[in-house]
Every structure is written in C-alpha cells, then in structure tokens.
Image (cartoon, rainbow, N blue to C red):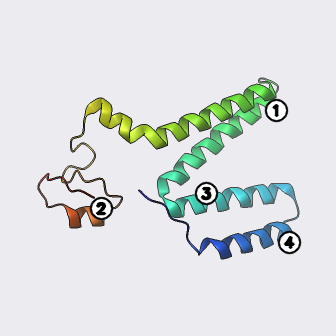
Amino acid sequence: MKIYFTVYLIPVVVVALLVFWLALRRDRPRLLFLLLLSVGVLALLHPIFAAVAVGLVLVTHQLVELQRKQRLRGSRVVLVAIILALITLGIGKYGRDGAMAIWGQDDWSSPTCSCRSASAISCSACCSTSSTACAV
C-alpha cells in the first residue's frame, strides 16, 4: 500500500487552522476538533488507520484518567503510551512480513489471488480467478 500526499489536504489544513484559532476559544472544543479532524484525515488515507488511532486515543485516555486519580505516576503513563505507540508502529510496519515468515506465503489473505497489490481492483485486473501469483 502506498500513501501519497494529496494537494487537497492543503485547503483542509488552512481551514482547520482558521477554525481552530478564530472560531474555537476554549480548550475542550479545540481538543475535540483536533481529534475528529485527525481521525477523519486518517480515515481518508485508509480506514484501518482511523480504527488504530481511535484505539490508541482510548487507551491513552484511560492512562491519563488513571494518572489523574493518582493510581499511576505521570512518567509511567508517558512510558506506557510511548511503548504502546512503538508496538503499534512495529506491528503496522512489519506485521504482514512477520506473518508471512512464520506461516509462509499462501493464499490465506486472499483466496483467489496472491498478488501484493494495494487494491482489489488492480488485483482482479492482475490475477485470474485461479490462484496464480502476479508480479505487482
């Protein structure tokens, strides 16, 4: 999967900055706005990114609540949040290759095509209905 910068993000960022600085005055609406905008942009790139981001936000929120109730120290909360983010990045970057190394490359991810294409449209154009591999 390749992700390219799109020029359509520039006006979104400009409008978001104007809304953030001029329209929103209190911290809570600003935080909610940033959270929704960030998850929305990630969802445009790929829906799984938004799901992962929401999961990380929820876990981090729970950690901050534990720190606020003085069940965890601030340094411990930061350490756990950073470790969780690094593990998530590692799984995202190396997870598919690790699964292929452990279980081998067969058609477990796609029953009709074993190409490494990012989209099903190009995969169906590349492979036939039999389990032939394509060089994409």
- Where residue 121 appears, x then y in whole percent? 29, 66
Along the polypeptide, which appears first: circle 2 or circle 1? Answer: 1
Along the polypeptide, which appears first: circle 4 or circle 2? Answer: 4
Dividing the image into 4 quarters, which one contains the C terminus? bottom left
Q: Which mark is residue 120?
A: 2
Cα separation, mark 4 vs mark 1, equals: 30 Å
The residue that label 4 is drawn on is 22
Which residue occupies 85% across, 55% down?
27
- Is there CB contact under 8 Å for labels 3 and 1? no
Q: Amino acid at mark 4?
A: Leu
The residue that label 1 is drawn on is 68
Q: Which mark is residue 39?
A: 3
- Is there CB contact under 8 Å for labels 2 and 3? no
Q: Amino acid at mark 3?
A: Val
Number of other residues with Cα within 10 Å of mark 2, as a class: few under 14, some 14 to 19, many 20 or more: few
Along the polypeptide, which appears first: circle 3 or circle 1? Answer: 3
Cα separation, mark 4 vs mark 2, equals: 43 Å
Along the polypeptide, which appears first: circle 4 or circle 1? Answer: 4
Q: Amino acid at mark 1?
A: Arg
